[in-house]
């Protein structure tokens, strides 16, 4: 299996800023409309990142042209991130135009780079048509006011999801078949694991930044609780599931493209969203650990870990891994506790403690005898 290269890691560093921007946006707009807008922004940003990862999987990132493409996408991603806080107000056109240029430009580059490889050329040719259409639609959304902008950008995500699910069908050209996407599943899994690490690292940066504003015993205790929560999420994802997932994807054969599409394009954004929401909850916790939990606080302090566990349960179920039931049960329990915590007005520290206990319970369940068995690594991709 090819390891992640330094240029890919450098590209990922841009998204530390992106996740920070998303967390701050959600913190400043913690209502239902703000949550929906943050979800749309995350969806668009994720489309840029995940398609770039797929291209890097098919090509050789250490080749100079591919490096130049990754650096160009990194620059575009920085512009996206800078425009993100005002994407629904004054910076909408900049955000949309940057999104369109990056999506179309990267796809055209990939089409040039894989010339002579019939299956890959066919897939990129069809996806280029869809990327051009969704890019133009995104720019249209940047030209109009809300709420039309929200609806159009949501449509961009929905159309992209439908296009990927159906193989980007184009009249007269047919559609691309997932079994023809000759990817190295282990490398793809490692790339998505790197993004999860970035998101978790950003959550620690948010809590650390809040801690520096008030270094007293109560705030330090709240910081330790928030840090323990981040460690617990890391443990749930990386302790046994991550290496097992790499092994499953590496040995999936012709199913790799189909599994990768579902596990990474569709499900991993839920994990990232859970981490972002949890980071917002941690910031609230540090700002006032003794404050009473209201509905908004319950949804971020308890709902963030619930969303993460639900996304990871679906991911494990898709890959046929054990542990998905305990994660699903943990997510349901946290969702059930959210209205209870808000109704009883428990302190934020108590709500965070409940979230930590449920997450630790999932970790303990993973340690039950016979839950995990060694996975056999599959053959290398013929493209590697």
Image (tube, helix red, strand yellow):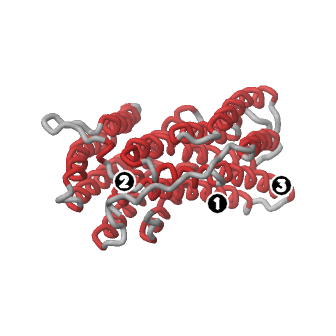
Instruction: Check disc 1: other Cα within 10 Å, few if <14, some if 14-19, many if 20+.
Output: some
| Left or right: 337 as drawn, with respect to 256 | right
Depth check, front residue: 365 or 335: 365
User: At x 77% / y 31%, what residue is drawn?
Assistant: 341
Residue 326 horizontal/vertical position (percent): 68, 36
- The residue where tag 2 is placed is 183
Between discs 3 and 1, the one toward the N terminus: 1
Quadrant in which residue 113 is drawn: bottom left
Work out whether residue 24 can be spotted.
no
- The residue where tag 3 is placed is 221
User: At x 51% / y 45%, what residue is drawn?
Assistant: 268
Depth check, front residue: 249 or 265: 249
SS state under label 1: helix
Between discs 2 and 1, the one toward the N terminus: 2
Depth check, front residue: 18 or 309: 309
Between discs 2 and 3, the one toward the N terminus: 2
User: At x 43% / y 65%, what residue is drawn?
Assistant: 2
| Left or right: 131 as drawn, with respect to 335 | left
Residue 220 horizontal/vertical position (percent): 81, 58
| Left or right: 269 as drawn, with respect to 285 | left
Residue 145 horizontal/vertical position (percent): 36, 36
């Amino acid at each position: 299996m090819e390891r992640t290269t330094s240029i890919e890691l450098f590209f990922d560093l841009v998204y530390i800023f992106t996740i920070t921007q998303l967390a701050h946006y959600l913190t400043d707009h913690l209502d239902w409309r703000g949550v929906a807008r943050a979800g749309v922004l995350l969806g668009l940003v994720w489309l840029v990142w995940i398609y770039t990862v797929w291209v890097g999987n098919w090509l050789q990132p250490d080749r100079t042209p591919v490096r130049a493409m990754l650096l160009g996408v990194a620059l575009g991603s920085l512009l996206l991130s800078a425009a993100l806080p005002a994407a629904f107000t004054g910076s909408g056109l900049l955000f949309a135009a940057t999104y369109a240029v990056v999506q179309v430009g990267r796809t055209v580059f990939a089409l040039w780079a894989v010339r002579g490889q019939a299956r890959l050329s066919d897939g990129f040719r069809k996806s280029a048509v869809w990327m051009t259409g969704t890019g133009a639609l995104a720019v249209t959304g940047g030209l109009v006011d809300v709420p039309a902008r929200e609806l159009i950008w949501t449509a961009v995500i929905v159309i992209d999801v439908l296009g990927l699910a159906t193989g980007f069908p184009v009249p007269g050209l047919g559609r691309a078949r997932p079994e023809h996407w000759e990817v190295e599943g282990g490398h793809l899994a490692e790339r998505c694991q790197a993004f999860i690490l970035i998101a978790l690292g950003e959550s620690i940066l948010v809590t650390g930044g809040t801690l520096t504003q008030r270094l007293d015993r109560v705030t330090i205790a709240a910081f330790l609780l928030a840090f323990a929560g981040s460690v617990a999420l890391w443990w749930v994802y990386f302790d046994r599931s991550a290496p097992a997932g790499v092994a499953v994807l590496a040995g999936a054969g012709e199913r790799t493209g189909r599994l990768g599409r579902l596990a990474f394009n569709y499900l991993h954004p839920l994990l990232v969203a859970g981490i972002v929401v949890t980071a917002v909850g941690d910031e609230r916790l540090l700002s006032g650990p003794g404050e009473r939990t209201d509905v908004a606080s319950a949804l971020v302090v308890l709902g963030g870990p619930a969303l993460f566990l639900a996304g990871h349960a679906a991911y494990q179920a898709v890959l046929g891994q054990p542990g998905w039931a305990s994660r699903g049960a943990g997510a349901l329990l946290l969702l059930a506790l959210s209205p209870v915590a808000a109704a009883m007005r428990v302190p934020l520290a108590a709500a965070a403690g409940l979230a930590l206990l449920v997450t630790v319970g999932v970790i303990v369940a993973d340690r039950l005898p016979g839950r995990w068995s060694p996975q056999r690594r599959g053959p290398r991709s013929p493209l590697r």
